[in-house]
Amino acid sequence: MRRIALASLIATSLAAPSYAQSGRLTLGIGRTETPSTVFVMNWHSAPRPAGWSYAAGLHATSLGSAWIGVGASYSLPLGNTPYFLRGTFMPGLYTRGSDMDLGGPLQFTTSVEFGTTLRNDAEVSLLLLHRSNGGIYRNNPGVNALSVNYTIPLN
């Protein structure tokens, strides 16, 4: 049993750098409809076959709300151009601060991102996101945000 655990640890350690080297970190700033300023930080793993990748996000507003979540994203290159579309779905936990009451802590964030890849492999994009509890709580107003983002490759 110890040998299996040790082999798993070694394999994970050896594989981790390859994932980190091709992952991406996104930083963005935008506005919500509450209105407040939103700060966006998202991470996407290297794309898996057919364009899917793992995703994680941390979003905070100027009114003290915060959300953290994990999920998946799909990137679609637009032909032989540097442009792309990316859709992301991440369930996560929300804390209100003095911002809008979204009904409860479990919130689902869906987003659509349109952007371009630069010569240095970084990306500039526009992100539209919607966050709501999907009707699992009585109160479900949802909130939308629009942000401008800069994404850097982690290699």
Image: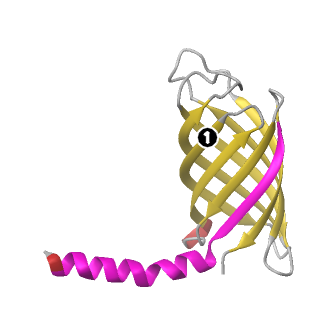
Q: Amino acid at mark 1?
A: Trp
Q: Tell me if residue 20 is in the magenta stretch.
A: yes
Q: Tell me if residue 88 is in the magenta stretch.
A: no
In this picture, residue 149 sits left or right of residue 2? right
Residue at image point 55% right, 47% down: 69
In which quadrant of the rendered image does the N terminus lie?
bottom left
Q: Is residue 63 above or below residue 85?
A: above
Depth check: 144 or 36 in front? 36
Residue at image point 62% right, 52% down: 57
Q: Residues within 10 Å of mark 1 (few under 14, many from 20)?
A: many
Going by the picture, which residue comes out furthest to the left? Answer: 1
Magenta residues (range): 3-31
Q: Is residue 55 above or below residue 22?
A: above
Q: How many marks?
A: 1
Q: Which residue is mark 1?
A: 67
Q: Is residue 139 above or below residue 117?
A: above
Residue at image point 62% right, 21% down: 140
Residue 114 quadrant: bottom right
In this picture, residue 92 sits left or right of residue 64? left
**Disc 1, SS:** strand
Residue at image point 52% right, 20% down: 137
In this picture, residue 7 sits left or right of residue 52? left
- Looking at the picture, how far across and down is residue 81, in whole percent? 86, 73
Residue 67 quadrant: top right
